[in-house]
Image (cartoon, grey):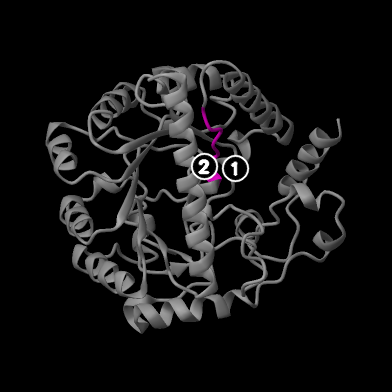
Amino acid sequence: MSTDDIHKTDELAEEWNQADLALSVKAAARHIPLIGTFELTPRCNFRCKMCYVRMDKPQMDKIGHELTAKEWIQLAEDAAKAGMLYLLITGGEPLLRADFKEIFEALNKMGFIISLNTNAALMNEEMFDFFSKYPPTATNVTLYGASADTYEKICGDRSAFARTLSGLEMFSRIPTVLEVRTSFIKDNMNELDEIRALSKRYTNQYAINTSIFNAIRGAESDVVNCRMAPSEIHALERRNREFYTKLNSANERAVIKNMDTEHFAGTKNNSGDIPPRVLHCLASKAIFWLTWDGKMLPCGTFSSPYTRPLEEGFAHAWNRLPTLAEDIKRPNECGCCEYREGCSNCPANIQAETGTFDRLSPYICAISEERHKSRIN
């Protein structure tokens, strides 16, 4: 592809992104659930030390049960009637479900623009044939490291590295927009360049995540001991930014991406005047998240508030959700903080860190301070 073709492709992609965002903001103004996430399971074939949602069966049994294929399909039909167009399928690892193909085929045939989150390690020839027939519009594969040693440290399984690469190779041959993603912690923070180069074997789409918060909704993980310090987060983000700045000034163009902007949930100040005003993003306005046990949340980082669409009806649950978020109170200190411009001030992140909405998180505050320093230095 020539340089001119690449520039045209980038321009078209940017136009598409802007159109998506404009559509989402208009949907929020009319309170249409345009964008949904179905979290099919909290189970996973990996045991990543920083995972915020992973559970084993005994943990799950204390909370509830996974929705059946029939229930997910019914929820999708109800969501479609209410206006859902974009659908993210995630977990845990969704491919672990024995009925995954039954669910995915039904959702695919409904006409949604579907994105799939997976670690790709469960891909095989059978799944390759299935996705070739029913491809997701987009597929997001998490790559945790550039070696089997790193996978053993983070995921608890060194063989998972080879299986992930095999899965990536298969997804690269499916008609889907493939993106590789990495969540960075201390164990892989020095592998940014190697992971990015490895991902380029399969796709030019690459995104990073440095927002590692405490486990939620009954899950357990070793987040505090393994996540990066605020200064390390800033250093990695700066290195990533410098890479793309240099790349885009040369003969190749690429978009710098962060995972926390998924479906515009992390896009600040696009809908601050739409209730609930405490949420500056599109959560509960045009976005919802359905958990494995049937709770509707504003987004996947929240533990509460939630509604129960299977019990009260999808439309009623969706309409009631923002009224519950109106009761969220931010920490008083946030209003006069000198670092607030560099802080997402996200209630969901604060809740994940502190267990409540109105108490400061020293970790989040330190990240905001570090980002403030980077702007003035």
Q: How far apart, in angstroms, are the residues tagged by discs 1 and 2?
A: 9 Å
Q: Are marks 1 and 2 in contact (CB under 8 Å)?
A: yes
Q: Identify the image quadrant of residue 304.
A: bottom right
Magenta residues span 254-260
Q: Nearer the viewer, mark 1 or mark 2?
A: 2
Which residue is painted at 39% across and 18% down in the image?
148
Asked if one can make out residue 245 in the rendered structure from this viewpoint, the answer is yes
**116 or 155, which is in the foreground?**
116
Residue 367: quarter of image: top right
Label 2 packing within 10 angstroms: few (<14), some (14-19), many (20+): some
Residue 353's spot in the image, x, y percent? Answer: 64, 53
- Name the image quarter holding the C terminus: top right
Foreground residue among 19 and 257: 19
Q: Is residue 173 above or below residue 339?
A: above
Q: Is residue 350 magenta?
A: no
Between 288 and 291, which is closer to the camera in this rendering?
288
Q: Which residue is at 73% across, 50% downward?
A: 343
Q: Amino acid at mark 2?
A: Met
Q: Is residue 217 above or below residue 375?
A: below
Instruction: Report the residue at 60% width, 42% height from top.
Output: 211
Instruction: Give the structural element (helix, strand or loop) at label 1.
Output: loop
Q: Main secondary structure of the magenta part?
A: loop
Q: How far across and down, in percent of the image, does residue 93 sit?
A: 33, 45
User: Which residue is denoted by mark 2 in the rendering?
Assistant: 259
Q: Is residue 258 magenta?
A: yes
Left or right placement of residue 23 versus residue 41 in this view: right
**Does 116 appear above or below 108?**
above
How many C-alpha atoms fall within 10 Å of the one at disc 1: few (<14), some, or many (≥20)? some
- Indicate the position of residue 140 as horizontal and vertical percent values: 38, 39
Kindly identify which residue carries mark 1.
211
Whichever of callouts 1 and 2 sits on the residue coming sooner in the sequence is 1
